[in-house]
Image: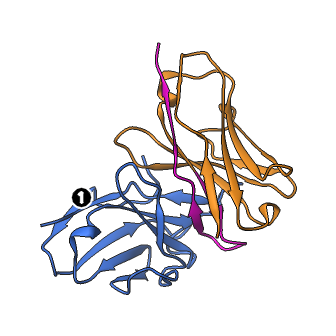
Amino acid sequence: QSVLTQPASVSESLGQSITISCTGTSSDVGGYDYVSWYQQYPGKAPKLIIYDVIHRPSGVSTRFSGSKSGNTASLTISGLQAEDEANYYCTSYRPTNSFVWVFGGGTKLTVL
Amino acid sequence: EVQLVQSGAEVKKPGESLKISCQVSGYIFTNNWIVWVRQMPGKGLEWMGIIHPGDSDTRYTPSFQGHVSISADKSSNTAYLQWRSLEASDTAIYYCGRRDGYNFHFDYWGQGTPVTVSS
């Protein structure tokens, strides 16, 4: 069972927008601005798309954006494209032991 | 160009040992932490542990402490993930990733090493 809670699956139509949530606690998501999001295609390595809640690495589409409110972080994808169909994982800093990261369970995005 | 290149697919029997690798290039190996992540078939990503190649400081998540060993060889710019006795439940794809400096995210990843453990 993952420490951070994500919906198992979401779906939306081409061209629309969708938001994927990532809910934690005040010990992780709510306590620090160190939430990152990774995109993963089946059988491929994860790819960093958002870090420190809102920042996009160079080369990542501006259609991806991040935000946070309280203990819930969110990833929004606007203008959905077929290539956005993938799995998305959130992760957060959580300094409760010597290993300080926790994952969400992942969300499968289907683009209709 | 930063690259993390992992060793190839492995097929092993329960009880056998295994060491997989993650060789990096394009940056100074000893400057960045390397993390290992497991992905079991059809499942999500799980953190396993992390190592700083500069001083071999290694941290494990509770789920993997005592079951795997993480190491690094500065002379070959390579990080390793090792098992002494594999179990069928170790069947998974294993990814290595590079921590972006002292930030709290991982910016580059290896291509993954599939490991199958079956009698």
Q: Is residue A68 left or right of residue A9?
A: right
**Residue B96 on image: x %, y %:** 60, 52
Q: Is residue A71 above or below residue A109?
A: below
Q: Is residue A4 left or right of residue A111?
A: right
**Residue B63 on image: x %, y %:** 58, 39
> Is B110 included in the stretch rendered in magenta?
yes
What residue is drawn where x is 86% and y is 50%? B75
Q: Is residue B25 above or below residue B13?
A: below
**Residue B33 on image: x %, y %:** 72, 60
* Chain identity for the colour orange used in the image: B
Q: Which residues are magenta?
A: B96-119
Subunit of mark 1? A
Q: Which residue is mark 1?
A: A9
Q: Is residue B106 left or right of residue B34?
A: left
| Labels in figure, total | 1
What residue is drawn where x is 36% and y is 76%? A75
Q: Is residue A18 above or below residue B25?
A: below
Name the residue at the top extreme.
Answer: B119
Q: Specify the amino acid type for callout 1.
A: Ser
Instruction: Identify the secondary structure beneath mark 1.
Output: strand
- Seen from the viewer's position, the closer of residues A6 and B18 is B18
**Residue A57 on image: x %, y %:** 52, 80
What residue is drawn where x is 29% and y is 79%? A77
Local packing at callout 1 (Cα closer than 10 Å; few below 14, some 14-19, many 20+) is: few
Q: How is the image coloured?
A: by chain
- Residue A74: name its quadrant: bottom left
Q: Quadrant where the C terminus of chain A lies?
A: bottom left
> Is B36 included in the stretch rendered in magenta?
no
**What is chain A's hue in the picture?**
blue
